[in-house]
Amino acid sequence: MSLCQVLRDLLSFNRSLDARSSTTKSPSPKRSGPPGLARLPEKGDDGEAKLDSDADPPKKQVFTGRYLFWLAYQSIGVIYGDIGTSPLYVYSSTFSSSPSHDDLLGALSLIIWTVTLMVSVKYVLIVLYADDEGEGGTFAIYSLLSRYAIIVRRDPREERSIKMEREGNLPTTSKYTRSFLERSMVMQTLLKTVGVLGVSLVMSDGILTPAQSVLGAIQGLRLVDESITTATIVGTSCAILVLLFLIQPFGTSKIGSCFAPIVILWLLLNFSFGIYNLVEHDHSVLKALSPAFAGQYLVRNKTHGWRSLGGILLAFTGVEALFADMGAFSRRAIQLSWLCFAYPCLLMAYIGQASFISDYPEAYSNPFFNAVPPGWFYPSLCIAVLAAVVASQTMITATFQLLSQIIKLSYFPQIKLVHTSKIFQNQIYIPWVNWLLMVGTIVVTVAYNNTTKLGG
């Protein structure tokens, strides 16, 4: 047999194999992301996520290793800007005159235990577990309830992506409750009202918080130059707000990664100043770790003591963002960043300020800057201004997350949602809402022009 004949036989054999494989071609495997990550929905020709009628509902993402630490890092830059800047004004909001030593210990004890119980115990260890496939916020609880009881009519386009989990083997009481909710229009209306009201309050905070934070930060420059006019403060604040909303299309991941160093530096500064003041001044304030001082403070001051709780509550302002922003960062990332970093930094900040105020009671009026170690005033002022500006991001991100939830339940028109990360599926940006928030914050800033009017 000649060589040409052998080559012709081989070519004909290859063609027969190709024809056979084209007729019995197996489906191509689906692309998978990194280990531990859920597959994101594929995109259509217009670049927006599209629903696959045969696809399973999106599953909750679980992150470990470097992805978990990356999310924890991002969450510091987005979530803790608001609650992290509370040391600037808690003591000045609690006292109206120089406090006595006993009152100072009582206030510090109240701060320590409210932050511990309300944030660390209630939110971080309890509330964060009431999620709906990784999503948090007031409406997530309502959405979670709607998976087990038919209490809402969903948009057909979204219904395919929702997994109903109707359990049949329920106790008699639970079955009765579910049946009552499904039959009672009054209860369904009440649940809707409470859920939507909770989201509305957080979204309104998405307008007020940026205006309050940026105005307060720029007004702080008057500590350096009292000749700065109100027009200059308002104009600069509006310019910063416009810039803040212009960078939102970059997405939560990039914004959080950029803002995180500022918040980390700010919290470390508070931690360091706290240790310095505790060493240099009255270390006996550590007695306030006993909750007995909190009780004695309320008993001793009676009505005035209860009224002063309004200032104590500022120690955990913005805590709702831990739950509302959970979809963008995950429960474990928030728990890690709070318990291992933000929580100890804030506690040491309040303890250090109390130590300084114990020696210099008049320092309560501006607790952070009065307690700054020598030579650190201007660096701390710059970082404080940056941290206050970054605090605005907390409620902006929360607004995007909560609005996406009410869209899924058809309580808001279907508008464009942009998924800003290929890895973290719940990090979103809503262009239309972003520009409305920007207009709202600028109007509020111009109308009120200072934090005193805005807070009143």
Image: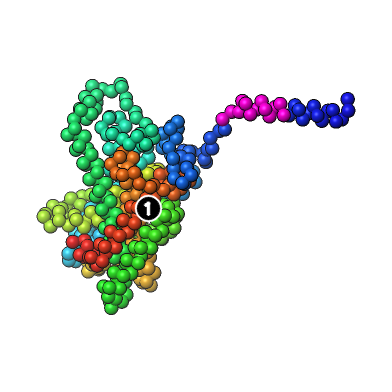
Amino acid found under the numbered disc labelled 1: Pro
Q: Nearer the viewer, residue 348 or 336?
A: 336
- Please provide percent x and percent y for residue 118: 27, 47
Magenta stretch: dominant secondary structure: helix
The x, y position of residue 278, in whole percent, is 33, 61
What residue appears at the point 17 percent right and 66 percent down from the top-left corner? 97
**Mark 1 element type:** helix
Q: Is 306 placed above or below 326 here? A: below
What residue occupies the far bottom of the structure in this picture? 227
Q: Give yes or no for residue 19 being in the magenta stretch.
A: yes
Identify the residue at image location x=31%, y=44%.
413
Whether residue 334 is visible, yes or no, is no
- Identity of the residue drawn at 20% across and 50% down: 292
Q: Position of residue 397 (x, y in %)?
A: 35, 51
Above or below, 142 against 179 in this view is: below
* Residue 406 in magenta stretch: no
The front one of 96 and 8 is: 8
- The residue where tag 1 is placed is 431
Q: Residue at x 52, y 40 (%)?
A: 33
Q: How is the image coloured?
A: rainbow
Magenta stretch bounds: 15-27
Question: To which quarter of the image does residue 24 belong?
Answer: top right
Horizontal side of 373 relative to 176 (left or right) equals: right
The answer to whether residue 185 shows anywhere in this view is yes
* Residue 376 lies in quadrant: bottom left
Query: Quadrant where the C terminus lies?
Result: bottom left
Quarter of image, res 425:
top left
